[in-house]
Image: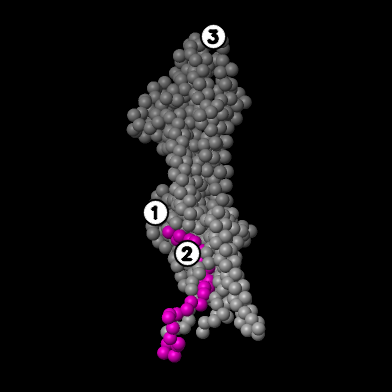
Amino acid sequence: MSGLFYTFSIAKRGMAAQQTSLHVTSHNVSNSNTIGYSKQRATHKTTDPFPMPALNNPVGPGQLGTGVEVSEITRARDEFIDNSIRRETSNLLTYSSRDQFLNSIESIINEPGDTGLSNSLTKFWDAWQGLSTNPENATSRKLVVSNATALGDSFRQTYTQLEELEKDLSQLQRDHIFSVNSILNQVSELNEQIKQITINGQMPNDLMDRRDALLDNLSEHINFKVEKGDFNSIRVVTKDPNGNERYLVADSKVINGVAAIDDVSFKIGAKDIDKSSFPLNINKTTDIPISSPKITFKVYIDGDINKPSIKTVDLTEDNIKKYFNVEYIDSDNIRIDSIKDANLLYNKGTKDISQAIQNAESFDFANGAIKGLEKQKVEISDYKNQINDMARTIVIAVNTIHSNDNTKNYDKDKNNYINFFEDIVGSNHPAASLKVNEVIVKDVSKINAGSVIQDKDIIINTVTGETQKPDSGDNYRAKRIAELRNIRLDVANIKNSNDFIKQAYDVSSPTFTGNLAKDPIIQSSSGDTVDTYYKGMVAELGVSAQEAKRVVENQENLIQQLDIQRQAVSGVSVDEEMIDMLQFQRAYQANAKMINVVDELLDVVVNGLKR
């Protein structure tokens, strides 16, 4: 029943509630600059009134309140905003990874500039043009060799730097995968702690903030969605571009981990797959064993690069297409363009990790840094292929005109000449091996410009066999090579001399009986000049870089706006907390004053009645 002690209890509860609120306010202020922290609030509710309605309760004017208590401490969080930020962060990292490495490629290409490949090409063609007008001049010949050497150096440097960048991408991709596994392990551990604390009737706000911060971090690496579970637990689900979903975390356990494929360890049958040798031809008869052919490769998990696991899959057409970008498969050969940048999901519940890897499935994330790096590796491979195509076309075209060194009887005197460049026919990376023939480097007189000086007054035309006075007009080979600057060719499809001759001389029959030096090169209506082909590649790179930069800026602005909305809901405002602190302080003082009043009244009752 009501009385002074009843009032005393109400005041005591009031002090306790205000003290709890002050404690929460202090916690908010302390974490005002903590990343991922959500402001908390102590929810006050009235305690059960007295008396409760019953037949044996005394009749009175109404129920008397019993005070206040803190029912729960909640955190301010908007799940819709959280999910939006994570989704857009995954999109951002897809393009920011691309933006970063496209900028690196632009630095490697270095166009326009005085040290780029375009400048080397210009000087190379200019040197041949100069030689065609002054073939007997040793300086002109040396200039051709020096500029051709510089061109080879430019190709080699560009190609090597692209290869190194590709290796950096692979390592960075593995680092991201290791981070994903680490985050998933932490999320699963926090999930279990949160679940147990919730079961015990408490609200683990700080632990949920830590889990949300981990999920924000995870969204930088991969795309996923969060499903709610019992007792504040969650499930993490990822999805591939085709909409196939896989659980990563559920029931406080990591269901699937992510494994990094070592893309330099592939074997098809007994044949090692060398990435620098793409495109690669696999002969089904000589390269693939008859019994139980397999594809094998190394797989890394949890960042331990010293302990790779070996995964083996059956050599089937489906598996080949799963792990490789295939140009074609016929009855005799498999033509592979590149290795696919797939990831593996493996069952973390399997105790035998080797068995888990064997049962792992290929999986392609839809967004995130890992996906962005995968896309960028494909782009780098494309640029490498274009650089190789340019180098191959230049070498084949120049050598064909310079030496007629090919399998057809294009010129009866072909055996008298040597290649200007070292032969690269059949090479899978000619840009890395383009260089001037050592014989010509040592003796520039070996350059076949179309005429060979026998003495100061006589020139024997090596094409016609005629003897004549020196005349720059008969230097057909140097002229033809110089003309290549303006000849449109299908650069990507010139693999040998036959391909070049069919395009440049409009030859439809398998045998060409003309003269490569004297017959005019026919301007094709399709294709590009080598210079235009390269400029197109540079322009495409520039457009891609600008597009990536534009998307990154848009995504950053969008995420910034979403973060402002999140901070409006979850962020700690010190000014607001100070206002709340004063409010709780005054309420605490008022309750303390109430206790003081009750104390005085009790003193009247206990001591004042003695008088």
Taking 14 as reference, is 366 left or right?
A: left
The reply to whether the magenta stretch includes residue 533 is no
| 67 drawn magenta | yes
Label 1 close to label 3 by CB (< 8 Å): no
Q: Estimate the x, y position of residue 521 in percent, counting from the top left.
A: 39, 24
Of the numbered discs 1 and 2, the one sitting upstream in the chain is 2
Q: Badge 3 is on which residue? A: 457
Q: Residues within 10 Å of mark 1 (few under 14, many from 20)?
A: few
Seen from the viewer's position, the closer of residues 517 and 220 is 220
Q: Closer to the N terminus: mark 3 or mark 2?
A: 2
Residue at 51% of width from left, 84% of height from top?
A: 1
Q: What residue is shown with label 1?
A: 331
Q: Residue at the spot x=48%, y=81% of the render?
A: 50
Q: Earlier along the polypeptide chain: callout 1 or callout 3?
A: 1
Residue behind mark 2 = 236
Identify whether 269 is placed above or below 274: below
